[in-house]
Structures are given as structure tokens and as C-alpha cells.
Amino acid sequence: MEPLASKIRPKTLEEFVGQEHLAGEGGPLNIAIKQKHLFSFIFWGPPGTGKTTLAKIYANSLNARIYELSAVSSGKADIRKILDEDSPGVPKVLFLDEIHRFNKSQQDFLLPYVERGEITLIGATTENPSFEVIPPLLSRCRVFVLNELSEDDMKAIIKRTGLEMDQKAEDWLVNMANGDARQAITMLENTNELYKKITVENLKNALQSKFLRYDKAGEEHYNTISAFIKSLRASQPDAALYYLARMIDSGEDPKFIARRMVIFASEDIGLAQPTALVVANDVFRAVETIGLPECGINLAHGVVYLCQCKKDRSAYDAYMEAMADVKKFGNLSVPLSLRNPETKLMAELGYGKGPASADLRFADGFGKARASAGKYEKYSKESFLPDKLKEKKYLMK
């Protein structure tokens, strides 16, 4: 029997719900379809947000033949079979779900066919493609970021199922699914099959009996990593080790955990113990080198260390405040005294004028400064920020 999610899957952009920045009027995918522009790209976003549906709509709108593969269970032989298939005049589009599961060798094999245009690649991933996709392949693809579906989007999709329920059941389902339309539809289908009536109680019972222990592509994934990070912040090694063990036992990618620890070392420990970043990076390299199951020991070592470190978010907070000003004010002019007078005209316009510029300028391309360290110190209290932000203090010491 065809799953409900497949039955109600949108066939056109007009039917599609959500991702207005991509599929809405003026969005890049919308424009590409209207212009019949065929190119390779990668969808990156949470599960159940429309990656597969948008890929099918795009390929069908361009009259291309779409081949669907999962990187979990497919390999080079499957790609060869697609390439060898005769399709005169019909472009081939490969939709590769969970592209981050393809190893380097498999991605290297795929690369020349994408380069030559023998196949158009649409990848889908819940992981950061800059970490999981080899640079040569990534450089030949645009990356489109998909967002979690909003409550209104979720309610519109639930309405498409045609299954009746009261407001409490709908609100509970939207909250539980956390922006994952596929999960919501699957739960509705399971509940309807088991109980023939959609209520909060029946939804809860169906949830317990059917699924959601730990799904890398589901809500529990995000709940567990959130609990893990919060335990690190609260310096609770017992809790952090428990959530670490839970993720490892459930099949979470250890590199994903290690990356979160590297981020944590700078974001939450920062200046309180700068060596935390060194340790976290070493843990990440150990995970890459050792692999499962033994790399769990390296992760545990790092987790306990990070838990015991003092915490200081000042560098992170200062950076976020500076970023907020960049977004608010745009590219403010760099003070003339800080600009290098590379040409005679620049010098005449006032570039590099002032003692600070002379003392701090580099003498050659090897970074050898003209001034001694002592000369630098007298400028430590002078603001080099753009005029509009002269009085701003991001890092509060």
C-alpha cells in the first residue's frame, strides 16, 4: 500500500508548502524552473522539510528523468547503471538522498560525470555539506538551505491528509513533529490505522507503540544533542556522558558529536581556558583516525575535560554583537588612516596618513613589521573602528 506521505506529495510548486525563500515567487528554484535551467545543487536542512519533493518537482518540470538513490545503500555500480541507461535527448537527474553517507571514493567517482554534464546531481543532506561533501564536488553545486516548517506550514500540510481531528490534537501533533512534515503525516497515518480516530491520547499511544526511540533524522536527535550541550555548559559530566553514550549507541555519527565539541570549546569555554579548543580539535582528529567503536573512548575523554573547564562566552558574545552591527549598518567605511596607500592616488586621497598607519604597516609580504612591539602598545587604546562605531566595546573585559 502506498504511504500517505507519497499519496499527498505535491506535484508542482503551486501545491508545495513552505520554503518560500527557495520555491516562492522570485526564489532561485522557482526562477530556475521557469527558465528551464538545469544545474546541480544540494539541499541542506532538517528532515521532513521538502527536500525529496522539491527535487522531484524540479526534475519533472524540466522534463528530465529522475533517478532516486540513497547513499546509505547505493554505490558506484548503481551510478554506472544510470549512466549506461539509454535516454536520448532526456537529461538525467540523480537525486542522492543522504549524500553525506557517500565516502570520498564514491564522491570522486561521481565528480567527472557531474563536471561533464552527463548527469545532474541533486543531493540531500541533514549534515553540513562543507564538512561531508568533497570540495571539488561541492564547488560544482549550489547549496540551498531548507528551514524547519512553520506552524502554519505544518497545519496546511496536515489539512492535505484529509484526516479529521480537533484543535488540541492538531496543536499537539504540530508541536511534537517540530517542523518535520513527514513525521507528522506518518504519525497521523499510524494513528488512523490503529485507532480510526485522531485524538491526543491516540496520537501518544501510536507514538509509543510505533516509533521514535532515537532517529538521526527526527526530533529525538535534536533533543539529545541539545541535552548533551546543556550538560556540558552546566559542567555535569555524568549527564554529558549519558547523552554521549545514548547517541553513540543509537548510531549517531561520532564526527558530528566531535564537531559540536569543537564549537563548544570556543563558544562556551573560550578565553577561560584556551587550550580547550586544542583538546577538542585533537578529539576530532582522533575520531577521524580511530573510528567506532574505540573512538567513543576519545569522545568520553574530551567530554569530561570540557565539562571540568571554566566557562567564558565573552568572545562569542562579542562576535555576535559585532555581527549584529554589520547586519544593521552594512559595510561602514574603514578609516583612511588604516588603509594602505598602494598607489600614488590613494596616498593623495589620505590613505595611510597618521602615525598609527606608519608604525603598524608591514614592510614586506612576509609579515615583518617595521615597528617594534613597544611601538604597538601606544595604539591599544585608540579605536580603529569605523567612525559610526568609535565608542563601541564588544569585548567587555
Image (spheres, helix red, strand yellow):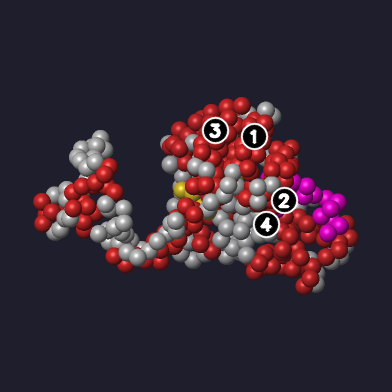
Residue 220: which disc?
2
Q: Amino acid at mark 1?
A: His
Residue 281: which disc?
none
Q: Looking at the picture, does residue 18 appear above or below residue 89?
A: below
Q: Amino acid at mark 4?
A: Asp
Residue 282: which disc?
3
Cα gap from disc 1 to disc 3, whole angstroms: 11 Å
Cα gap from disc 2 to disc 4, whole angstroms: 12 Å
Tell which tag, 1 or 2, sits nearer the viewer.
1
Cα gap from disc 1 to disc 2, whole angstroms: 24 Å
Tell which tag, 2 or 4, sits nearer the viewer.
2
Label 1 residue SS:
helix
Mark 4 = which residue?
A: 180
Instruction: Give the class, few, some or many, for how many residues have Cα within 10 Å of label 2's Cα (few <14, many ≥20).
Output: some
Mark 1 = which residue?
A: 301
Q: Amino acid at mark 2?
A: Glu
Of labels 1 and 3, earlier in sequence is 3
Determine the residue positioned at 54% across, 28% down. 105
Q: Is residue 52 left or right of residue 330?
A: right
Q: Amino acid at mark 3?
A: Asp
Magenta span has 219? yes
Instruction: Give the class, few, some or many, for how many residues have Cα within 10 Å of label 3's Cα (few <14, many ≥20).
Output: some
Q: Position of residue 176 (x, y in %)?
A: 74, 60
Determine the residue positioned at 69% across, 47% down. 236
Of labels 1 and 2, earlier in sequence is 2
What is the span of residues highlighted in magenta in the rendered image? 204-221
